[in-house]
Image: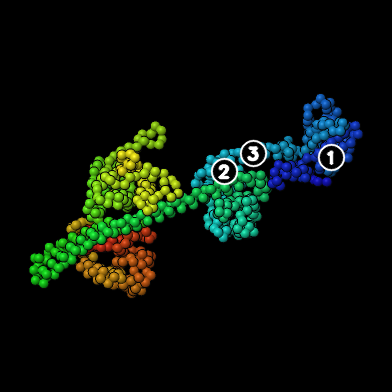
Amino acid sequence: MVEPPSDSDELTAISGRGLAGEILDLYTGGAFTFWRWTPTTDSLVTHGSLVGESLKDWIMRIHPRDQAAFSEFLDQDWPQAPSFVSIDYRFNANRNGDWIRVRHTGGLPGVGGQTAISGLVEIISPPTRSRTLLERMEGEMIEGESRLKDFFIGAFAMSGASDSEPLLELLRKTLRAETVTLLNLDSRSDITGMITLPGGGHAFRIGDLGGALRKALSPLNGDPSPEVFELDLDAARTDYPWVTAKTVVMPDGNVAAVLCAGFRTARGRSGARRFHHALSLTSSFTASRICRQLEASQRLDLLAQLRQAQRLSSVGRLTGGFARDLNKLLASVQGHLHLLEEAVACRDWEAVAEPLAQIRQSSEQAADFSERLLPTGTPRPMEPKVCDLNRLVERFVTMMRRVLEENLEIRLDLDPSIASVRADESMLRDVLMDLLLNARDAMIAGGIVTIQTSSTTRHSVEKGAAPLPFVCLSVSENGGPTHSDHLPALLESLDLKEIDTNGSGFGRYHVASIIAEHGGRLETCGDAPKPNRLLLLFPANEAKPEARTPVPSSRPPAESLIETHLRGMTILLVEDENAVRKLVRKLLEVLGCNVIEAVSGREALELWPEIRDQVSLVVSDIVMPEGVSGWDLARELHHCHPDLAILLTSGHGDLPQDHGLGGIPRIGFLQKPYGLNTLREQLSALTSSALVP
């Protein structure tokens, strides 16, 4: 005989085979018995844990106080009774005097012309709840359906969200798990990261799950299992040793992650088996989210490559104008050098001043032009700040007029009353360069490009909202290229086949993407159907432009104090170019400094133990041979001597923050080429905060 469940047993889904399987589990566990009595033959048939050889034997096992009620139950007018009638009574289940409470449900189905009373005898456990296990299972099923309904509604609402935590929390509540964790895997099934709900804490340690997952996934031989599987962890090492898991399979068939639900008890894990579909659906949504993230990442990478290609293209298209302008400056320098030589040979000292002034002016023009051109072609993270758009346009156009053909005229119509804009100045220069170069390429015979700034408004997407203020930068050409209204739509698509990469479409896509990153809009206008005016709209900013530190054109008033401060200081000069090293040494000596030379970063590190007590400041080039760059040297020396002042110099566009050295007051950067005054100010700023250049 199968022992019936004790009064303390709770309903638990054991089989995981659906409703029929769970009912079979209850039957084999002794939760109910099939009962059938035929009055004409007085024969009793039972199937289950509660048995009786005859009706008399069955009645004798009923509690004496309940026997009369049971007899009335059997003697009622069954044809006139409802389809099913129930009675509760106490029953001796195992003949040892242990009474259990049962619910007897009977009916009168006709079988073979004989009258038979049949039905179920269900054990009520525990008695205080007055419910049979079948009733409780029905309640669990109804409650489970409600949970699944809530899960599906919530999961589909979150299907497009980028954050995983709300979906994981919804799954945890549906499974009634103690924790749900998403484990990201690499191609070797090693864990690369995990997302655990804040409320659940770090339920799983990576070391605990890693080996168990690899063991579970290894039999698949690269074929991801579509089924939910279970893991038994070491209960001594984790709070949730009973794990239900589901792989997150990508469209290419690779396993990208695993969803793991942790339970404190095996019974808790068993109770969640009927909700495995929720785990599978969460896995599908997670795979879709990972795909979206990968697509977004690939799109950003592709956009970065497009921008870099456009920058390099712009540099290439500027090369001719740059070379022409540089040749003019070199011709001026060479000519005045000849005049200087003649004046020196004749000892005509009055005639020396004019050539020297012209040489200085030409070198300053070349240095200014190089400084403005240098950021072009160099990828940088976006660094927006409040800036004056008019001033930026004026400075940039001044440079471009020197490198564009003479038959291309640039006219400015700038509104002085426009608001400031918050933007990355380097990116705005990229935009202007693309537009001007596209106009130049389109107007071979020459023409006029008009750049205009103005204030405007645009309606918000929200109904009833006030119009938003914008600053408009418009570029128009007479006879120049036309612009497509379809540009903004391209920004939302990964399909770049519509971009004409052989023409100016590459540049216009670049422009559109930059404007979008600044929260702006791109519009076209002009005579339809070929608009030739491009409107770049930036959100207006009420803040004042960030102040720029002016570069003094003459020696500052505090110069004597600065020189007094620098005089006698020992400086380590690290420079691999012999001519540059000699020049910088002379400049430092003019300032009264003592100089120790090193021709490479490696030599400087080898010399350092001998000279560190003498050196107050290091001036180092950045790009050097022998595998130790200026960045490497600065990091090493700053690590050992945090108070050591270090001035890094370079003709390239990299900055200290690009190499993990940003925000350190004792590390400065000086762009080559530079003059004596600029060098003096940088050295003073690094060595004494009390002296202001």
User: Does 134 sit above or below residue 494?
Assistant: above
Q: Amino acid at mark 2?
A: Leu
Toward the viewer: 513 or 215? Answer: 513
Q: Position of residue 563 (x, y in %)?
A: 21, 64
Real-space Cα separation, disc 1 to disc 3, in angstroms: 33 Å
Which image quadrant is residue 647 in?
Answer: bottom left
Instruction: Write down the residue under mark 1.
Output: 46
Which image quadrant is residue 640 in?
Answer: bottom left
Real-space Cα separation, disc 3 to disc 2, in angstroms: 15 Å
Q: Position of residue 14 (x, y in %)?
A: 71, 47
The crowd level at tag 2 (other Cα within 10 Å; few <14, some 14-19, many 20+) is: many
The residue drawn where x is 41% and y is 35% is: 462
The residue drawn where x is 54% and y is 58% is: 186
Q: Amino acid at mark 1?
A: Thr
Q: Which mark is residue 170?
A: 2
The residue drawn where x is 59% and y is 41% is: 151
Q: Which element carries disc 2, helix, strand or loop?
A: helix
The crowd level at tag 1 (other Cα within 10 Å; few <14, some 14-19, many 20+) is: some
Label whose residue precedes the other's in the sequence (3 or 2): 3
Residue 17 placement, left or right of 81: left
Label whose residue precedes the other's in the sequence (1 or 3): 1
Q: Which mark is residue 145?
A: 3
Q: Which element carries disc 1, helix, strand or loop?
A: strand
Label whose residue precedes the other's in the sequence (2 or 1): 1
Toward the viewer: 537 or 477? Answer: 477
Q: Position of residue 172 (x, y in %)?
A: 59, 45
The answer, for residue 357, to whether it is visible in the render is yes
Q: Amino acid at mark 3?
A: Glu
Q: Look at the numbered discs 1 and 3 and tell me whether their residues touch, using CB distance below 8 Å.
A: no
Q: Which element carries disc 3, helix, strand or loop?
A: helix
